[in-house]
Image (tube, rainbow, N blue to C red):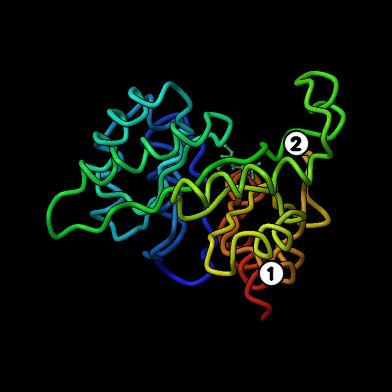
């Protein structure tokens, strides 16, 4: 795993838009995220294509189901030889343990098991929504840290959270626990549907292990320039 990756969310409808987008990066090897939109359209061949081109892959399918189903699904995902996969921590500890069992079973001899992280609370969730829609009355910061502890106790490698929860998670779960933070925006960017946002600089200062950035790069007039600007802020250059 590279130290502190900038993960680019390939939230595109199909492989043709992906090829067009990656064509602007002059052969640079990226850490990319394949989510539901692209995977449900293209399936496993998109992963093979990205691997062949030297990119690292976060396969973001956010599994959330009964333990047995998640275990079997993870067994299959492990065979894709991606770097990182995820589940929803809300599925509970037994489900997270089952996810790891499935990954272990599906990882071929000589291959590395994909790291597995749990989404704590989506970065599109506000404190108010948590209370009023989801009927969770604890402060969102506490819920996120509690879910992170559950993930750690289940043996997972880390969590997805917002930048603002990273310090407390590292205190509770140890500094080698991975914290991947989406909801990254430059001060000049549109917020879109994100709520718990932060700049790349804030993410670096707070100690995020990795950041996930989609639209600020994919929808930029010049995606390569946007990528470089964000990477420089993230790396503190
Ligand atoms: O698991 C994720 O990657 C994820 C978790 C989360 O809490 N929030 C979140 O935005 N994401 C993903 O991160 C990406 C953020 O994209 P942008 O908002 O366009 O930067 C999307 O692909 C989301 O699916």
Decide if residue 190 is in sight here.
Answer: no
- Image quadrant where one finds the N terminus: bottom left
Q: CA distance from mark 2 to mark 1?
A: 22 Å
- Mark number, residue 155: none
Q: How many marks?
A: 2
Kindly tell me whether mark 2's CB lies below 8 Å from ligand 1.
yes
Q: Residue at x 38, y 64 (%)?
A: 29
Where does label 2 land, which residue?
A: 192
Kindly tell me whether mark 1's CB lies below 8 Å from ligand 1.
no
Q: Residue at x 52, y 29 (%)?
A: 91
- Crowd around label 1: few <14 · some 14–19 · many ≥20 (10 Å): some
- Crowd around label 2: few <14 · some 14–19 · many ≥20 (10 Å): few
Image quadrant, ligand 1: top right
Find numbered disc 2 in the image and state the secondary structure of the residue it sits on. Answer: loop
- Whole-percent x and y of residue 184? 70, 52
- Whole-percent x and y of residue 79? 21, 42
- Whole-percent x and y of residue 31? 44, 58
Where does label 1 land, which residue?
A: 204
Q: Nearer the viewer, residue 126 or 175?
A: 175
Q: Nearer the viewer, residue 83 or 96?
A: 96
Q: Residue at x 77, y 55 (%)?
A: 164
């Amino acid at each position: 795993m590279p130290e502190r990756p900038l993960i680019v969310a390939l939230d595109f409808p199909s492989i043709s838009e992906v090829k067009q987008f990656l064509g602007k990066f002059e052969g640079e090897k990226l850490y990319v995220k394949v989510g539901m939109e692209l995977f449900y359209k293209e399936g496993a061949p998109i992963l093979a294509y990205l691997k062949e081109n030297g990119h690292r892959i976060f396969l973001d399918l956010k599994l959330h189901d009964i333990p047995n189903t998640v275990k079997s699904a993870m067994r299959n995902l492990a065979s894709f030889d991606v770097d990182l996969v995820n589940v929803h921590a809300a599925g509970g500890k037994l489900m997270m343990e089952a996810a790891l069992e499935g990954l272990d079973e599906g990882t071929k001899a000589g291959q590395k098991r994909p790291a597995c992280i749990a989404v704590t609370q989506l970065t599109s969730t506000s404190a108010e929504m948590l209370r009023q829609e989801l009927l969770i009355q604890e402060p969102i910061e506490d819920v996120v840290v509690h879910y992170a502890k559950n993930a750690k106790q289940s043996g997972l490698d880390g969590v997805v959270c917002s930048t603002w929860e990273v310090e407390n998670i590292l205190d509770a779960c140890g500094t080698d626990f991975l914290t991947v933070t989406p909801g990254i925006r430059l001060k000049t960017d549109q917020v879109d549907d994100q709520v718990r946002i932060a700049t790349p600089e804030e993410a670096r200062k707070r100690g995020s292990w990795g950041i996930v950035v989609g639209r600020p790069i994919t929808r930029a007039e010049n995606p390569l320039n946007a990528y470089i600007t964000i990477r420089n802020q993230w790396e503190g250059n």
